[in-house]
Image: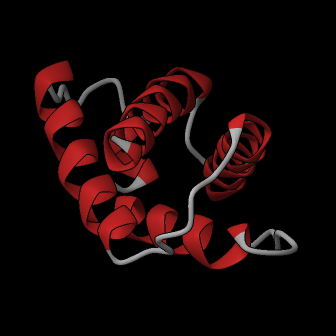
Amino acid sequence: MLVYPGRFEGLVQAVTQRIRMRFPPVVANDPERSVSQERIAEILRETLAAALQSGREDRMGFFGKLRLRNAFKRELREIGYDEKFVAFASDQFMEQLGRRAA
């Protein structure tokens, strides 16, 4: 597993592990197991909201959010998710970050 220096390490690992438990790569990458986009979005929203709620409460600037998103994407790739899922999950991740900041 990749290690991310600084404040992103714990958060990225917590979030990706929660996703891995709820929606493993073997299911996400299997075209024969059709999981609706709505169900995937629901799983990601629930998982990300829970992980981010228990995460650090400090505010993050624009570049911090970009670094966090990139670390999140790299970790998902390392775990074994395909690019389509990585892109969708990172969009959901940034949406949740925006909600948390509001």
In the picture, measured across the screen, residue 39 lies left or right of residue 91, that is left
Question: Vertical placement of 59 versus 63: above or below?
Answer: below
Which of the colour schemes (rainbow, by chain, secondary structure, one colour) is used? secondary structure
Residue 20 visible to the viewer: yes
Taking the spot 50% from the left edge, 62% from the top edge, the residue there is 16
Q: Is residue 38 left or right of residue 82?
A: left
Judge whether residue 21 can be spotted in this image: no
- Vertical order, 48 against 54 (above or below): above
Name the residue: 41% across, 46% down: 101
Could you tell whether 99 is left or right of 101 in the image? left
Q: Measured along the vertical axis of the image, is residue 79 above or below residue 3?
A: above
Q: Answer left or right for 70 relative to 43.
A: right
- Given residues 81 and 7, the one toward you in this image is 7
Quarter of the picture containing the C terminus is top left
Residue 42 position within the rendered picture, expressed as x and y whole percent measured from the top left: 14, 39
Q: How many marks?
A: 0
| Residue displayed at 41% across by 62% down | 20
Residue found at the far right of this picture = 5
Residue 29, compared with residue 9, is above or below; it is above
Position in image of residue 94 (x %, y %): 48, 34
Q: Position of residue 59 (x, y in %)?
A: 57, 57
Task: Say which quadrant the N terminus sits in.
Answer: bottom right
Residue at point 74%, 51% (across, down): 71
Towards the viewer: 75 or 34: 75
**Residue 52, how many percent across, how many down?**
38, 63
